Structure formats: structure tokens, C-alpha cells
Image: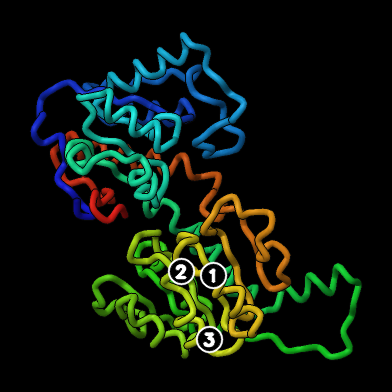
Amino acid sequence: MSPESPSPAASHAGEPLTVAIAVPLEAELVEAIRAVDPAVTVLYEPDLLPPERFPADHVGDPAFVRDPEAEERYWKLVNSADVLYGFPNESAAGFARVVAENPRLRWVHAMAAGAGAAVKASGVSRTELERVTVTTSAGVHALPLAEFAVMGILNGLKRTAELAADQQAKHWPELRIPTRLAAGSHVVIAGLGEIGLETARLARALGLTVSGTKRNAEPIEGIDEVATADRLPELVPHADALVNTLPGTAYTDGLIGREVFAAMRPGTILVNVGRGTVVDEAALLEALEAGTVGYACLDVFAVEPLPADSPLWAHPRVLVSPHTSALSAAENRLIAERFASNLRRFLDGAALPHTVDPVHFY
């Protein structure tokens, strides 16, 4: 599938449509989905869904367990739908099961922006993925991720890790080391998609100049240089900061590794809000020890949760964030609005944006 694929509703025009809410969602947002079209049946049984622990908690309370009768009701609900809001049980295994058991299923909307990894992990065949379209919530998380990325850049420029260490030690240094200005600094963004472009917008507002990578290296207004990912080592020698927004695929695995770090100038800031597998963590630790990377702000890791024995936990110039930078109190509303818009397109037989590619899984 392309980023925008023909709607699978096109061949079912005029037929009744059933949507099932498979993950926790506020009742008022369910009503907003129902309001898209009175002919659509929206199945929503909140007692079958785990309670949210915080806003936009799509997994819900892990202590929640359905009894056998409720479990049967839940699977009867998702297996009777043409369209699902969320993966069943918000898991790759749940997605695999519903695809296998529900022959009428045509579209699943995922809560994550990077749902390709879960689709791949499900083991669902390419043939089945031609039958069942998966759309993601890409773009919904662009602003919070971009704000986090800019925070990471500013942390590095303003030496907040050293300030925190001095505060912890109650140390007032005699030699006050200057910080760096954002204005006039340069950031390279690996992945100029929606998240990358939003990061670029915020960075430019602070006076940074921006270059970056994209699959198709076409000029973008406001971006100094756009190159393909293989040219990243040519971009980073001029960077004060490198921000990764790329998804985890076979093509991006270890992309930011020894070659890229060797091309950096000392003190470069690294921010990762994409996927942990894009950064070679062993090479990153070497670059931190060498001073090539002056500060790293990491929201994602190759293995999550980050293992307790990872040196990244205790490194004085690393901020570890538990893959939470995309979260915001507005997330559920924004995803429901995206789904409602897509549902209207689906009913009209229009192309659906942000579909998961069944070959490359992004």
C-alpha cells in the first residue's frame, strides 16, 4: 500500500457498516464517531474494556481481566465488525487473531503512529493485509514529539544535565562555562515526515537552521538541504544537533551508527523520538565517551523497557525517557477526530491516508 491507499469500502458501497471500539475510549468520543453517519452501527461496550490509568491509555489497566463470559463477548464484538478502532487488546497477537477469525474485517485503525512494527510482529500474511487495510495515527503525535525534540536540543545547548548534577551536589562552580545559542545553530533531522517537519518548524522559530533526510530528496521550503538517508554522514559534520524521527525498518536499522558518529563534530546533541533500533546504542556509548556526542535525549530504545543493566541509565549526559514523549492529554480526542475523518472517507470510497505498507511495514 502507498501512504494513501484506495478505500476498501469502494467495493462494498451501500452495504451496512459496523464499527467496533476495541480499546478504551471516552463515551463522548464514541458519540462523535457515531455522528459521522447514522447508517453506521458503532459497537461500544465499556465494561469489556480495561479502564484508562491516564488520558489516552490505549492499553488500560493491566490488572483488568475479563471473565470467560466477558472474553467471549469481547471477541464476538470485534469479530462482528467491518472496521475496528484499535487493535484488539492493543496487541499484535490481538490483531493476528481478529484477522484470522473475522472474514468481514476490512479496516483497522491503529492508535500508534508507528503501527507497522506491530503489524509485522503479528505475522499476518501479505495477502491478508491486502484484504485488511491498517491505518495509523501518524501526524496526531507530531506536535508533542516535536516539542520533546526541541526540548532535547535546548537541554544540550544549555547544558541542563550539568546544571542538574551541580544542583544535586550543591556545587557552585568557580568557572562558569558559557552555553550555546539556539539562534544560529544547525540541526539535521533524519526523517522529514510529519514529525520531522513539525520539529523543523519549531526549531526554525528559535533561529536554528535545518537540513535533513527524506526518501525522495526533493527541495522543501525552509529546509537548507534535503538528502537521502545514505547521505546522513555528509550532513552531520555541519550539525550542532541530530534528531531522529525515522521508524524502525530493515532499511533504518542501525542507520545512526559508527559511520555517522565518526562524521560528527565534538559535542553534537543527539535526540531520538523515532525508533530505538535506528541508533546503534553501543556506538552511541562510544561516541558519548569520546565526547563526539555531548548530550543524548532518548525517548526510544532498541529493547523496551530499557534493561536495568544498560549503561544509558546512569550516563551523566543522557536523558532517558520511557517512550512517553508522544503522550498528551489531547491524544484520544485527536485520534478519534482522525478516525472520524477517515471513516467519512471510507464511506465515500475515498483513499485512506497513513496506511501501513504490507511490504516495508511503515
Amino acid identity at mark 3 = Ser
Between the residue at mark 2 and the residue at mark 3, the CA separation in whole angstroms equals 17 Å
- Decide if residue 133 is on the left or right side of residue 191: left
Q: CA distance from mark 2 to mark 1?
A: 6 Å
The percent coordinates of residue 338 (x first, y second) are 34, 43
Looking at the picture, does residue 15 appear above or below residue 57?
above
Mark 3 highlights which residue?
185
Q: Residue at x 50, y 86 (%)?
A: 262
Q: Please tell me in which quadrant of the rendered image residue 73 appears.
A: top left
Q: Secondary structure at mark 2?
A: strand
Contact between labelled residues 1 and 2, with CB atoms less than 8 Å apart: yes
Indicate the amino acid at tag 2: Asn
> Which residue is label 1 attached to?
271
Q: Which residue is mark 2?
A: 244
**Dot 1: what SS?**
strand
Check disc 2: other Cα within 10 Å, few if <14, some if 14-19, many if 20+: many
